[in-house]
Image (spheres, rainbow, N blue to C red):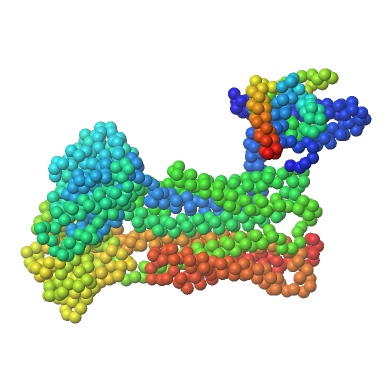
């Protein structure tokens, strides 16, 4: 794991994807773009990790996919959260909150 | 239902792979397009944007690969791919595959076969309820009856002690007794013919202590074992019941054994064989019927008739130490009150102080075979696993050589994107395929081999009745062995093979002769094989030489041309008196008159059949520690000595003047004469049984006969006294005949003659004295044969290994050899160049192997006869054989090297 921008803490990618999809259904590129935008360019998600993660989450039943037309009339695979996905997002967010709070306490001590 | 979705999605991507693939492609394309479009909007030219999007994504194949790997089905697909690829690669080099599979099959098969024997003989627990709670009184190392005051660690017990212990102990939930002798007699099931029936006499508590439930009917209970003669019932074994057609009406039928009718009350469950491994009785009969089963025995009332094994079940929570303490307390109280009178002698009290009961675990049951074959089996499985180890080393070096020639292939695959772990997995799959093929062939042959091993081990009936063969446990063992084997020989080559320098491997057409570390690993493996096979060859030649020593031992008797008939005289229905003696004399005389028969005689024992021993006191000879030890006894007919070709050295043998009413006589052997009468002639002197001087005049010595082996070939000369059966009336089981001419004709003539004298005397199996002598060294024979086989196998594997290594080395060095020859090296010196390498390897292997062999051989010095484990001749023989084998294996490649044409060799670069 290097220090260049774009590396993220292991296991957080799925959480970010869940959060992104919680707002609305999106296709793969949209997810990547949204993460990059919101993080102000800190996280740049490569399709080589994004698409396998989406596929894994689909297998796990946290997202489901559907082929739809895009805004400029192309076919794209749209992903949206399932109820299990929403639940997972809630759990992971609160776990994350606990962890970061703990880490900051340690760092500030 | 996530797992369901996961599985269906996986299956879909396996079976509808084109559709999944298309969707993946489309999604990637969409991603690229969207990304390019965003870049265009940000101000790039269309070409720049498309290019930047592609650079960001990287190889689409890699991305697809990552996506595919997210599902489980990829692993299956990869495995399937690897398997197909492995099979193709193996099919492409059939010679390698054949050598690998055959050597693995031999290694795995040998281990499986020997393990299946070990499992039956040593490891398996009795098929009873909670076998771990069962304890045996004593170590079970004796069978028969003992009539002396217990003065040592005891093994056999009287019926009255069994009753006493059952009643008084506080540590056992149940106590059972089993007669130490299994009865083999003739009997009839109502409405069927006469057959041999093996019966085991057991206490009424036997089945309940073992926790056995009947297959049908009922089992024996306490009420069957109350008063002598009261329990004329029998429980049949399941296998006997099966042999009689599994007739449901069997329960309630009657069997007639030794003059008594027994009602069959039940059938034991399948697989139950009692407590002695390798003995499957046909019937279990209550101990209350002892006198009926064996006339002349009075064990139920006679406390000196100690002939029972006692097995007890520990109460839950009772420790072995508590049980031992309680048992010994009861035992000593019992001996003190029952055996020693009001005023015991000092000697009796000293004996009692030494008497004790050692409790041993009975979880695995009793077994003569276990005692006889445990050490041999442990040695054999060690040898077999060494062979497997050699086979592994051999395969590893062959795989290394192969991987070198495949290094371009691996480099190519890695260059186009295969990961290293993927190739290691592929190579390991190849190893597993090889190991699996070896295991399948090995197990198939082990099935046959374990039976062959058994028959090699012994001809006896108890061995024949044992069930061996791969069951689930054994197969489990083989599976573990196979996986271990595959990892052992496959891991290092696989890891080595993938440590490639891509550029170098792809560029170079053929390696130069620079010694690589891979090559030195191969040499190391050869050295390991040589030293291990040296260990095997040394032990093989030790066992062989030991066996030769054993067979060279003078038995004293002449074992050639002697038939031993086993028979049952009891069925003639005569009591133990002069009428029986008359019948026996008639049979001897009739058989002896047959043409071709030189001598015929009944005898209690011939050789290796057990012993009857007792201490004796000679009249006028003070007792010393030496002459107070047991003297072996035998009861024989008057032609016994001539039947065994034992010359009478002094005095006379038995003759017709030795009648039941004439003075008791005995013939003693040289050792006994020397022991008791070192300075005078024993003829006319007297001795008696036991230590009571008042009986020392009972028996007169009329002759001295040459020493002969009694129980074992290895025994040192033992004192023996022979008694004529005319003065010790008994039923015999042995009839010995010295003959000349055709064995088959004599056998049928003897059978015929006996039937003519009395058709009710049943003549059973016939063997020869030579067979009995050979059977007594069965375990040594087994080890000698198998260790030689494995030794030769190991040498053969080394041969292949050396040949493979050298062929490879010669191929690598062809150009070097060409240069040498172009510069004037002669063929002989090239030959030497190659062979020298082998001799160095052999030298190192031997230097490492000799200490291992010397160290290892001490483990089995107990099994060697007449030579030390460091026997130099065996060591030299093994070393010599290895050198010859190595040179033979090395010669072909070396010769090929010496025939290299310099011009050809140089051009082929």
Where, by quadrant of the figure, is residue B455 drawn?
bottom left
Which percent across, then down, holds residue B407? 72, 52
Q: Compared to B648, does B104 lie above or below?
A: above
- The residue located at (76%, 70%) in the rendering is B820
For the N terminus of chain B, the image quarter is top right
Q: Nearer the viewer, residue B88 or B845?
A: B845
Q: Say whether residue A6 is visible.
A: yes
- The residue located at (41%, 58%) in the rendering is B376
Which percent across, then down, holds residue B238? 31, 39
Q: Nearer the viewer, residue B369 or B588?
A: B369
B866 left or right of B140 in image: right
For the C terminus of chain B, the image quarter is bottom right
**Identity of the residue furthest to the left in this view:** B661
Q: Compared to B81, does B494 lie above or below?
A: below
Where, by quadrant of the figure, is residue B887 drawn?
bottom right
Which percent across, then down, holds residue B391? 56, 56
- The residue located at (45%, 47%) in the rendering is B447
Which percent across, then down, holds residue B312? 27, 46
Q: Nearer the viewer, residue B433 or A90?
A: A90
């Amino acid at each position: 794991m290097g220090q260049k921008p774009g590396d993220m803490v292991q296991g957080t990618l799925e959480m970010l994807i869940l959060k992104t999809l919680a707002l609305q259904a999106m296709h793969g590129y949209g997810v990547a773009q949204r993460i990059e935008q919101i993080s102000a360019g800190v996280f740049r998600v490569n399709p080589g990790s994004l698409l396998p993660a989406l596929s894994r989450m689909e297998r796990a039943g946290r997202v489901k996919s559907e082929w739809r037309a895009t805004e400029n009339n192309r076919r794209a695979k749209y992903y949206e959260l399932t109820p299990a996905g929403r639940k997972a997002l809630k759990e992971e967010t609160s776990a994350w909150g606990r962890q970061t709070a703990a880490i900051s306490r340690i760092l500030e001590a | 239902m996530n797992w369901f979705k996961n599985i269906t999605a996986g299956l879909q991507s396996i079976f509808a792979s084109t559709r999944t693939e298309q969707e993946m492609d489309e999604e990637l394309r969409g991603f690229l397009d969207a990304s390019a479009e965003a870049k265009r909007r940000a101000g790039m030219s269309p070409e720049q944007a498309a290019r930047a999007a592609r650079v960001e994504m990287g190889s689409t194949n890699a991305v697809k690969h990552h996506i595919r790997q997210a599902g489980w089905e990829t692993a299956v697909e990869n495995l399937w791919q690897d398997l197909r690829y492995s099979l193709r690669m193996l099919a492409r080099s059939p010679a390698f595959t054949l050598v690998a599979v055959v050597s693995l099959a031999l290694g795995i098969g040998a281990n499986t076969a020997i393990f299946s024997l070990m499992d039956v003989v040593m490891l398996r627990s009795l098929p009873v309820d909670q076998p771990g709670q069962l304890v045996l009184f004593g170590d079970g190392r004796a069978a028969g009856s003992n009539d002396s005051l217990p003065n040592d660690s005891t093994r056999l017990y009287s019926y009255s002690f069994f009753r006493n212990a059952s009643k008084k102990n506080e540590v056992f939930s149940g106590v059972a007794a089993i007669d130490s002798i299994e009865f083999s007699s003739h009997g009839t099931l109502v409405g069927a013919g006469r057959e041999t029936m093996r019966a085991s006499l057991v206490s009424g508590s036997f089945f309940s202590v073992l926790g056995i439930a009947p297959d049908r009917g009922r089992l024996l209970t306490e009420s069957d074992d109350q008063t002598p003669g009261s329990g004329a019932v029998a429980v049949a074994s399941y296998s006997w019941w099966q042999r009689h057609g599994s007739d449901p009406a069997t329960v309630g039928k009657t069997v007639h054994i030794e003059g008594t009718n027994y009602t069959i009350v039940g059938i034991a469950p399948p697989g139950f064989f009692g407590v002695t491994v390798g003995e499957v009785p046909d019937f279990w009969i209550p101990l209350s019927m002892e006198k009926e089963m064996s006339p002349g025995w009075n064990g139920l009332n006679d406390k000196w008739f100690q002939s029972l094994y006692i097995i007890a079940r520990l109460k839950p929570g009772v420790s072995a130490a508590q049980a031992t303490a309680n048992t010994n307390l009861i035992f000593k109280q019992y001996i003190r009150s029952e055996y020693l009178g009001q005023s015991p002698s000092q000697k009796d009290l000293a004996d009692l102080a030494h008497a004790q009961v050692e409790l041993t675990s009975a979880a695995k049951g009793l077994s003569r075979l276990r005692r006889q074959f445990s050490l041999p089996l442990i040695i054999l499985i060690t040898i077999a696993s060494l062979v497997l180890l050699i086979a592994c080393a051999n395969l590893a070096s062959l795989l290394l050589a192969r991987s070198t020639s495949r290094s371009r292939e691996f480099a190519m695959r890695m260059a186009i994107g295969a990961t290293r772990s993927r190739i290691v997995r592929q190579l390991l799959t190849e190893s597993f395929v090889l190991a699996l093929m070896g295991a399948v062939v090995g197990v198939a042959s082990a099935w046959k081999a374990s039976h062959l091993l058994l028959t090699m081990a012994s001809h006896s009936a108890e061995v024949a009745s044992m069930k061996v063969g791969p069951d689930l446990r054994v197969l489990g063992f083989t599976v573990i062995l196979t996986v271990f084997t595959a990892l052992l020989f496959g891991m290092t080559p696989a890891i080595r093979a993938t440590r490639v320098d891509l550029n170098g491997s792809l560029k170079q057409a053929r390696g130069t002769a620079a010694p690589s570390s891979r090559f030195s690993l191969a040499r190391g493996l050869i050295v390991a094989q040589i030293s291990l096979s040296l260990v095997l060859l040394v032990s093989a030649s030790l066992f062989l030489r030991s066996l030769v020593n054993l067979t060279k031992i003078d038995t004293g008797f002449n074992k050639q041309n002697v038939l031993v008939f086993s028979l049952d005289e009891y069925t003639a229905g005569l009591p133990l008196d002069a009428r029986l003696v008359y019948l026996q004399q008639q049979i001897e005389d009739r058989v002896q008159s047959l043409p071709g028969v030189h001598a015929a005689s009944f005898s209690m024992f011939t050789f290796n059949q057990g012993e009857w021993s007792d201490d004796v006191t000679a009249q006028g000879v003070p007792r010393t520690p030496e002459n107070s030890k047991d003297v072996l006894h035998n009861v024989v007919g008057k032609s016994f000595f001539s039947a065994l070709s034992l010359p009478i050295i002094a005095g006379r043998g038995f003759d017709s003047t030795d009648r039941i009413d004439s003075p008791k006589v005995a013939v003693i052997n040289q050792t006994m004469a020397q022991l008791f009468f070192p300075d005078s002639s024993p003829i006319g002197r007297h001795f008696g049984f036991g230590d009571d001087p008042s009986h020392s005049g009972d028996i007169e010595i009329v002759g001295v006969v040459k020493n002969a082996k009694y129980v074992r070939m290895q025994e040192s000369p033992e004192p023996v006294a022979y008694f004529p059966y005319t003065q010790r009336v008994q039923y015999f089981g042995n009839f010995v005949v010295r003959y000349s001419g055709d064995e088959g004709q004599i056998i049928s003539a003897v059978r015929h003659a006996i039937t003519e004298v009395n058709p009710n005397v049943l003549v059973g199996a016939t063997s020869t004295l030579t067979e009995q002598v050979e059977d007594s060294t069965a375990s040594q024979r087994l080890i000698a044969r198998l260790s030689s086989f494995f030794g030769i196998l190991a040498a053969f594997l080394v041969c292949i290994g050396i040949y493979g290594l050298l062929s490879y080395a010669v191929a690598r060095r062809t150009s070097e050899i060409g240069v040498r020859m172009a510069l004037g090296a002669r063929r002989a010196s090239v030959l030497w160049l190659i062979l020298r390498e082998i001799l160095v390897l052999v030298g190192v292997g031997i230097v490492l192997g000799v200490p291992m062999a010397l160290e290892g051989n001490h483990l089995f010095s107990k099994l060697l006869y007449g030579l030390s484990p460091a026997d130099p001749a065996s060591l030299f023989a093994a070393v010599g054989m290895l050198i010859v084998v190595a040179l033979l294996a090395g010669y072909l490649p070396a010769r090929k090297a010496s025939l290299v044409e310099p011009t050809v060799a140089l051009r082929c670069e």
